[in-house]
């Protein structure tokens, strides 16, 4: 039923397992067969640098997931969005009655890409929020620093005035003491 290549991939599927620090995760569950396919993508500057999968299902689901992940690395997100089942089916010979599974795997990829965009948008919003907060804090610190500088300046002027008053007072005291003599 399955070719030797398909069975070899099934026995030792590359990219099997989760992926920490992933940029997007998509899970597709086929209601009829119950196959569960989870695709993980990791990106750097919108290029997929790693991809893994966790699949609970048929031989075809596991093999298609593995083949897809192997072919995602190096693609941009935009290129991955445009993929169809031929990216999988051209790399393995599945029986004709199992080729539909490639579409399930692509559905999981589409969900991973959707999740990627949501996470990216969230990060951008948080980044803008942090930048606005940093500017606000900087403005507040600048204002407080300016106020503190003014206080120090006033105190120094007061001290200078006090020194001047002390000098004047001392001069008067010396003058009065000279008159008294």
Image: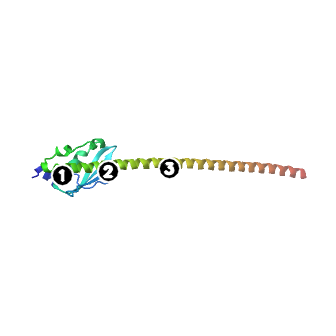
Which residue bears the numbered disc 2?
Answer: 24
Residue under the point 39% across and 47% down: 121
- Mark 1: give few (<14), some (14-19) or many (20+) Cα within 10 Å: many
Residue under the point 70% across and 48% down: 157
Mark 1 or mark 2, earlier in chain: 2
Residue under the point 83% across and 50% down: 172
Q: Residue furthest front?
A: 32
| Picture quadrant of residue 81 | top left
Please give left or right for residue 91 compared with residue 152 in the image: left
Visible residue check, residue 181? no
Q: Are marks 2 and 3 in contact (CB under 8 Å)?
A: no
Q: Secondary structure at mark 2?
A: strand
Q: Which mark is residue 19?
A: none
- Mark 3: give few (<14), some (14-19) or many (20+) Cα within 10 Å: few
Q: CA distance from mark 1 to mark 2?
A: 21 Å
Q: Nearer the viewer, residue 80 or 172?
A: 80
Q: Nearer the viewer, residue 106 or 149?
A: 106
Q: Residue 94: x and y, percent?
A: 13, 49
Q: Secondary structure at mark 3?
A: helix
Residue under the point 87% across and 51% down: 176
Q: Nearer the viewer, residue 88 or 14?
A: 88
- Mark 2: give few (<14), some (14-19) or many (20+) Cα within 10 Å: many
Please give left or right for residue 23 compared with residue 66 in the image: right
Which residue bears the numbered disc 1?
Answer: 63
Mark 3 or mark 1, earlier in chain: 1
Q: Secondary structure at mark 1?
A: helix
Q: Residue 147: x and y, percent?
A: 62, 49
| Picture quadrant of residue 90 | top left
Visible residue check, residue 39? yes
Which residue bears the numbered disc 3?
Answer: 133
């Amino acid at each position: 039923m399955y070719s030797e290549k398909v069975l070899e991939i099934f026995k030792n599927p590359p990219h099997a397992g989760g992926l920490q620090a992933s940029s997007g995760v998509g899970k597709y569950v086929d209601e009829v067969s119950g196959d569960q396919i989870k695709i993980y993508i990791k990106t750097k500057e919108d290029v997929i640098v790693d991809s893994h999968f966790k699949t609970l299902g048929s031989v075809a689901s596991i093999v298609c997931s593995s083949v897809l992940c192997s072919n995602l690395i190096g693609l941009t997100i935009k290129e991955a969005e445009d993929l169809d089942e031929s990216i999988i089916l051209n790399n393995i010979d599945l029986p004709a009655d199992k080729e539909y599974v490639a579409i399930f795997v692509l559905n999981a990829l589409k969900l991973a890409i959707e999740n990627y965009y949501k996470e990216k948008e969230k990060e951008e919003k948080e980044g803008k929020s942090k930048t606005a907060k940093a500017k606000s804090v900087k403005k507040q610190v600048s204002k407080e620093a300016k106020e503190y500088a003014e206080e120090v300046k006033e105190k120094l002027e007061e001290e200078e005035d006090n020194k001047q008053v002390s000098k004047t007072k001392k001069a008067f005291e010396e003058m009065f003491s000279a008159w008294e003599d």
